C-alpha cells in the first residue's frame, strides 16, 4: 500500500488500513508487530512513531490459538 503523504504516524497508518480492510479484527493493535525501516515501532514511539516519505512499514499479525 502506498500512502501519498509527506508524514504520518503508525496510528494514522493503522486507521487507514482499517478503512480499507474488510476484516478489521485482524488489525487490532495488540495483535500486531509493526516495524518501521526494520525497527520495532514500540521502541521508537509506539503508535505515535513518525512515518516519513520513503519509510518502509512492515505489519505482522500475531496468531494465537491452541
Image (cartoon, rainbow, N blue to C red):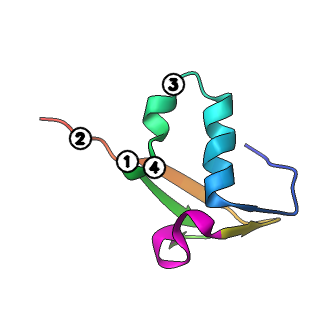
Q: CA distance from mark 4 to mark 3?
A: 14 Å
Q: CA distance from mark 1 to mark 4?
A: 5 Å
Does the segment drawn in magenta span residue 64? no
Q: CA distance from mark 4 to mark 2?
A: 14 Å
Residue 57 occupies quadrant: bottom right
Earlier sequence position, callout 2 versus callout 3: 3
The local crowd at label 3, few if under 14, some if 14 to 19, many if 20 or more residues have their Cα within 10 Å, is: few
Q: Quadrant of the N terminus?
A: top right
* Farthest top residue in view: 22
Q: CA distance from mark 1 to mark 3?
A: 14 Å
* Residue drawn at point x = 64 percent, y = 39 percent: 17
Q: Name the side, left or right, on which 47 lies relative to 62.
A: right
Q: Between residue 19 and residue 66, name the one nearer to us.
A: 19
Tell me the number on the disc at residue 29.
4
User: Range of the magenta residues?
Assistant: 40-49
- Check contact, mark 1 vs mark 2: CB within 8 A: yes
Does the segment drawn in magenta span residue 46? yes
Q: Is residue 54 above or below residue 3?
A: below
SS state under label 2: loop
| Magenta segment main secondary structure | helix
Q: Quadrant of the C terminus?
A: top left
* Residue drawn at point x = 23 percent, y = 40 percent: 64
How far across and how far down the image is residue 29, in percent? 45, 49
Q: Which residue is mark 1?
A: 31
- Point out the frontmost of discs 4 and 2: 4
Amino acid at each position: 500500500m502506498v500512502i501519498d503523504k509527506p508524514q504520518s504516524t503508525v496510528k494514522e497508518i493503522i486507521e487507514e488500513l482499517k478503512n480499507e480492510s474488510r476484516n478489521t479484527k485482524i488489525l487490532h493493535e495488540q495483535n500486531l508487530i509493526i516495524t518501521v525501516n526494520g525497527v520495532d515501532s514500540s521502541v521508537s514511539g509506539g503508535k505515535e512513531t513518525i512515518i516519513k516519505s520513503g519509510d518502509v512499514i512492515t505489519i505482522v499479525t500475531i496468531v494465537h490459538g491452541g
